[in-house]
Image (cartoon, rainbow, N blue to C red):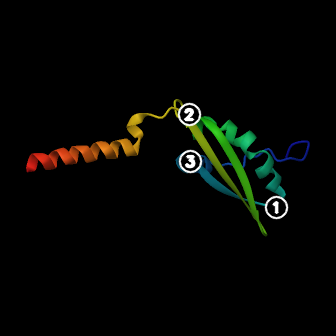
């Protein structure tokens, strides 16, 4: 413990970092006494410190933490990473355009078969 009585031990373990990196979400089981850490500081302190390990080649764009408590608490953490150029939409990724192209190609094949 530090002089002010607050524990300095990190709440996130490697498993949590890996889950955030793979799924964008993780949960921690914590005691009632630790619930303020989840709501007030997990995103600002622990997630932002680990953002390079979580959002490889991208930047952390959002982090939210929510609590669910009865006898013990679960701290649910969700993050989003934004890769460079994510806000630019490319025409090739437009499903309707690709579908229309595929249909016109099929129509051309049917005409050749006749």
The residue wearing badge 2 is: 58
Direction top: furthest residue = 84
Separation of residues labelled 3 and 1 (CA atoms): 25 Å
Separation of residues labelled 3 and 2 (CA atoms): 15 Å
Is the residue 86 above or below the residue 95 in the image? above
Image coords of residue 95 (percent x, y): 39, 45
Left or right of residue 108: residue 10: right
Q: Do the residues bearing badges 2 and 1 touch, measured as CB atoms within 8 Å? A: no
Image coords of residue 38 (percent x, y): 76, 51
Mark 3 and mark 2 lie on one chain; the one further toward the N terminus is 3
Separation of residues labelled 2 and 1 (CA atoms): 34 Å
The residue wearing badge 1 is: 32
Direction left: furthest residue = 114
The residue wearing badge 3 is: 18
Crowdedness of circle 1 by 10 Å Cα count: few (<14), some, many (20+)?
A: few
As helix, strand or loop, the secondary structure at mark 1 comes to: helix
């Amino acid at each position: 413990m530090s002089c002010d009585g607050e524990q300095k031990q990190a709440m996130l373990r490697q498993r949590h970092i890996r889950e955030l990196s793979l799924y964008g979400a993780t949960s921690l089981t914590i005691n009632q006494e630790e619930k303020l850490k989840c709501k007030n500081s997990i995103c600002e302190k622990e997630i932002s410190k680990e953002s390079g390990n979580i959002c490889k080649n991208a930047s952390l764009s959002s982090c939210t933490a929510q609590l669910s408590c009865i006898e013990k608490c679960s701290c649910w953490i969700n993050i989003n990473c934004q890769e460079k150029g994510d806000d630019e939409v490319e025409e090739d990724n437009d499903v309707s355009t690709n579908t229309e192209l595929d249909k016109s190609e099929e129509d051309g094949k049917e005409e050749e078969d006749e």
